[in-house]
């Protein structure tokens, strides 16, 4: 059985974000990942909630879906993490915008739109390390036929 479009979107975003200067190949699917106390800057990519409404008619009906996709940058540094977190956001935002194709869709037609809807930055000092995170929340619009969630239409 083919993968749900949500999974296809997550995997495509991971591929697009792998190799950015600050986080390099440390890009993973999922909101949980054991990171050591002095880990290198890392990205976690995951989806959360999704809404769906029946769109265009026909048989089977089409579902216009919007899934919330989060890209979390996580750091553990000897100094305040704010500048590194902002740099991660710069790199992620540029790479996400680069997912647009010539047809005005995203991810080679997998998604109809991807837009940044919020950014949250957190930082705390834990012992000798400063722990920080930046969460970029994207609304990803895509369409499937009802009953066929593995194919974008």
Image (spheres, grey):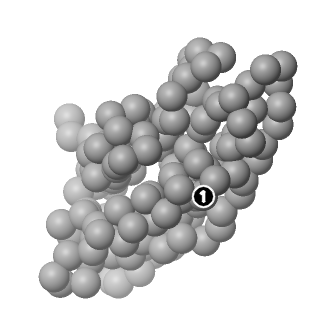
Q: Position of residue 62 (x, y in %)?
A: 34, 72
Image location (x, y in percent) of residue 19? 29, 44
Q: Is residue 78 left or right of residue 146?
A: right
Q: Quadrant of residue 31?
A: top right
Q: Nearer the viewer, residue 5 or 101?
A: 101
Query: Residue at 42% across / 40% down in the picture?
Result: 23
| Relative to 89, residue 113 above or below | below
Residue 43 versus residue 88: which sits nearer the camera? 88
Quadrant assignment, res 60: bottom left
Residue 61 visible, this angle: no
List x then y, in percent, for residue 10: 37, 47
Query: Percent x, y for residue 93?
Result: 46, 65
Q: In this orientation, does residue 86 appear?
A: yes
Compared to residue 30, the image places residue 92 above or below, namely below
Is 153 in front, or is 116?
Answer: 116
Which residue sits at x=21%, y=69%? 109
Residue at mark 1: 86
Answer with left or right where residue 90 lies relative to residue 13: right
- Quarter of the rendering occupied by the C terminus: bottom left
Does 57 appear above or below 128? below
Relative to the observer, which residue lies in front, 132 or 45?
132
Q: Residue 136 appears in which quarter of the rendering?
A: bottom right
Q: Is residue 26 above or below residue 105?
A: above
Q: Residue at x 18, y 66 (%)?
A: 108
Question: SS class of the residue under badge 1?
Answer: helix
Numbered circles on residues, count: 1
């Amino acid at each position: 059985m083919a993968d749900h479009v949500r999974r296809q979107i997550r995997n495509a975003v991971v591929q697009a974000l792998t190799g950015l200067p600050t986080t390099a190949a440390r890009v993973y699917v999922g909101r949980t990942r054991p990171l050591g106390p002095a880990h290198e800057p890392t990205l976690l990519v995951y989806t959360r909630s999704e809404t769906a409404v029946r769109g265009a008619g026909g048989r089977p009906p089409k579902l216009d879906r919007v899934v919330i996709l989060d890209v979390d940058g996580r750091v553990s540094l000897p100094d305040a993490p704010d500048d590194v977190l902002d740099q991660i956001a710069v790199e992620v935002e540029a790479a996400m915008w680069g997912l647009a194709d010539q047809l005005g869709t995203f991810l080679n037609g997998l998604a109809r739109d991807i837009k940044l809807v919020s950014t949250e930055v957190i930082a705390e000092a834990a012992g000798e390390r400063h722990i920080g995170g930046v969460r970029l929340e994207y609304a990803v619009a895509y369409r499937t036929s009802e009953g066929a969630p593995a194919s974008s239409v």
